[in-house]
Structure formats: structure tokens, C-alpha cells
Image: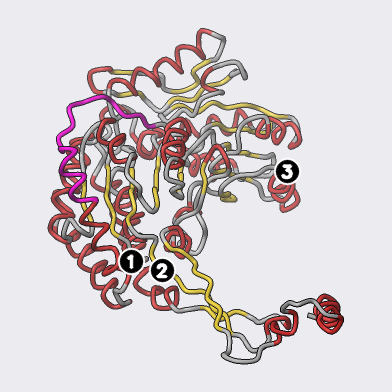
Amino acid sequence: MNTTIDTLQAPSTFEHIDQVFEAQQRNAQALKATTVSQRITKLKALKKAIQDNATELRQAIYNDFRKSAEEVDVTEIFVVYKAIDHVCGKLKRWMRPKKVATPKALLGTSSRIIKEPKGVALIIAPWNYPFQLTIDPLVYAIAAGNAAILKPSEMTPHTSAFMKKLIRQVFNENEVAVFEGDANVAQHLLKKRFDHIFFTGSPALGKIIMKAASEHLTPVTLELGGKSPTIVDDTTNVDDAAEKIVYGKFMNCGQTCIAPDYVLVHESVKEALISRMKDKIHQFYGENVKESPDLTRIVNERHFTRVKQLIDDAVDKGAQISEGGDMDASQHYIAPTLLENVAPEMEVMQEEIFGPVLPIVPFKNLQEATDLINSKAKPLALYIFSKNKRNQQFIINNTTAGGTTINDTMLHIVNPHLPFGGVNNSGIGKTHGYYGFEAFSNERALLKQRVGFTGIKLIYPPYTDRVRKFIKMFIKWA
């Protein structure tokens, strides 16, 4: 996802950050000792606070970039509720020590894996889903027994202020705290010896986070982004594909890390797909798209200018606007836009778009399509629209992506039983469900040996002939 940090006056003092961080470190051992029921109680209290303040949350997000209440409910609140519900239902099993097998060489011992919290976590969140992408990882941090400091984006100040108020209602600062502010605040936080850093944002910022984490060898989860392709073959139901692509692409005005970034469509169905996508845009947002209450705006002027420049560059180099292209800088409004005749050298085919612009590229065969995908960094998501199972499998076998949905877009993120995350440039580490709990947990190996004689003692020095015979037997049979 494409997120940056502007330089503003930090509203939080560095001294306060230092005090809270030290308080959380002192409290970490007590949090480690919390029971399943205690952690569930905290999560339920968080959910109750969200429910009680949902109207204020909807207004805060609307104030930041005019997202409709309905879209807030679906993409921000629902996701967090479901994460909490899932964790509460599974946490007892996740926290239970796991017995593992004993090899012959260790007869007489017993082994298990225990889950313990990493300690104090830093969660740095982006602006595009400002509530969900801050609170969702917090759910897993709490479930695993950690303390956490949250750094939301300054680009969505109303939502950040809301979250600070919300968290204060539920948690003491020595367990969870929110610090608003600019890049200076983030940089100060990154100097601390956190036990885990969970970052959601652009690959460019992900490199900065990873470099800072390396100073303390702090483990990271990096949920990044990239150019997520959509393939539409000649066997698909074009009307169905058009509807689902338009929904996935223009939700949140295209400001979604797993939104379809560009469409590769078989040349035989290209015109039909474009025609149906045009229809679906107006079905969703009306004939006067600008007046639709359901279309979110670009978050700020800088990102409006960035997306506008992508369109301008493409048109200057020969691309054609098939739909949309209308803009209003005063509202940060860009209409849902379809681009044809795009070329690889255009910026719109090189950068993650992160806006309501969809390039459409025809292909003759699937090898051509997968070759184009593989010429770019590994994507966070890949979408396949096809009725042909062999085609589906060919694409899966010949590409790599963090996640894939067949005959829809983005839905893999909703299933809590699936890991969510990228590959290399699009992300490091996984989250959601058990994978989110695991990200904030240390898997501690525990082996218990009997007291007195053990088989291992037969190979202790001095290495006499007798001992050497046991070593040979050990190597052969153990």
C-alpha cells in the first residue's frame, strides 16, 4: 500500500513516549502471566467500547476522507469485530502447550512447545483503513499477552484522535497506548528496543522500518503492498467478473493494498469486459458519480496529485481513458477511471496505483499473462476469473502471491483461517487468526529429561572403545 508520513509538529512529547515504554516493559511480566479468560475479558471490553462509540467512529472516518457509514461498517468495524470473536473462540486452544514427539535418541524425555508473549510491541498503522489496520493487529497482540504502543497515521487525524480516546477508555498506558504525530514520533519510537514491530504501509517505508529494527534485531511483521494483478480469461462470466472487479477496485476509492491494480484480460473478451465494467461503475455510483455518497475521496492533496500524475503520464504516452478521468482538486475527487492502450514504460504500470485508476491490458495466452506478472515484484494479492480449472491451476503454478482469490476479489482477507501477508517486496510475515496470534508470540521449546541414568550418558567422554561402539549404534539406530 502506498503510505507516507508528512513532517508535522508532533503532538506527543518524546519524554511521554519514554515513560510509557518503560512502564510497559515493567508490566510485561505481569501481562505474560495473564490467563485465557483475562485476555478474553480485555478483548470483549474493547469490542464493547467500539460498539458504544461506533457513531463517533463513523463520523471521524468520514471527516478524514468522506467514507460512507456503510463502508466503514463493512471494512473497518466488521473486520475488527470478527477478529475479536474469532480470537475469543480459539484462544484457549492456541495458548495450550503443544506436545511433540520424542525421537529414539531422546527416549525418557518429554517435549512440548509453549506460547509466550514477545513482550512490548510497536504497531505502526497506515491511513487507508485507519481504524481496522491499527486495531486488528492490536487484537492479536493482546491475545498473545503483549503490551503495545500504537502509532496511527497523521494523515487521518480525526480517526487517530478517536482511537486515542477509545484506547484510554479500555486500557492503562502501561498496557496499551496511542501516540499521534509525524515522522519524528515514528523515528523516536523506532529507536526503542521493542520486542516486535508490526508495520502496515508501503514497501519503501517497510525498508526503513526493517533497517531500524535491525539495530536491535527486533523481529518484524511487514504488511506492505505492490501491484496486485487480476487475470480474466476467455471462459469467465464477463458480467460477474466486471461486477466483482469494480467493487474490489473502487471500494475506498482504490486506496486498498489488495485492490486489483491492473487487469489482464483475454483479447477475445476485452471489449465486453470494459463495457460491463462501465455499466457497473454507474450501477454502483450513479450517472453523476461525483455526487454519489458511496464513493470515498482521495485522502489528501498530495495523494490526489500523485494519482493525477499517473493518469497524465499514461495519457501523454498514448493511453486512452475509456471511463472516468474527471477530477476536482478541491474535493480530492477522481472519478473511477479505466485506462486502455497502456504500456510497460508508463508509471501507472510500474508503481502501485493506490487510487481509482484501473489499467486494462489484453493478452493472447496465459503464458503471456503470467510472464508479465512475473516480470514485476511478487504481489500481495492475485485474482483469477475463470471457469476452467486447468487455467486456474496454470496461473497458480506459474505465479507467486501473498494470497489469491478465484472468481472474486479480496475475499481471502475475510477468512480468519487463512494467513494474510505478502511475499518479499509485498510483505514479510503473516497475520489474521492463528497467524496473527503467532506473530506476537514466541514459540518456546521445552524438553524435560529424567533425573539419573539416561541413554545420552552412554556417549559421554572419555571416548573409550565401549563408548565409540555406543556412538556408532547411536548414529545408526537413533
Residue on which the image places disc 2 = 116
Q: Which residues are magenta?
A: 3-21
Q: Residues within 10 Å of mark 1 (few under 14, many from 20)?
A: many
Of labels 1 and 2, earlier in sequence is 2
Please give the name of the residue rendered at 56% of the width and 78% of the height, measured from the top-left corner: 447
Residue 183 in view (yes/no): yes
Q: Are marks 1 and 2 in contact (CB under 8 Å)?
A: yes
Of labels 2 and 3, earlier in sequence is 2
Q: Which mark is residue 336?
A: none
Please name the amino acid that badge 2 sits on: Glu
Tell me the mark number nearer the camera, choosing from 2 and 3: 2
Q: What percent of the width, then of the height, locates residue 400?
A: 65, 44
Quadrant of res 228: top right
Q: Which image quarter is the C terminus in?
A: bottom right
Name the element at disc 1. Answer: loop
Quadrant of res 17: top left
Query: Nearest the camera: 233 or 279?
Result: 233
Task: Using residue 320 as the reference point, say whether residue 128 is left or right of it.
Answer: left
Q: What percent of the width, then of the height, locates residue 412?
A: 51, 54
Residue on which the image places disc 3 = 398
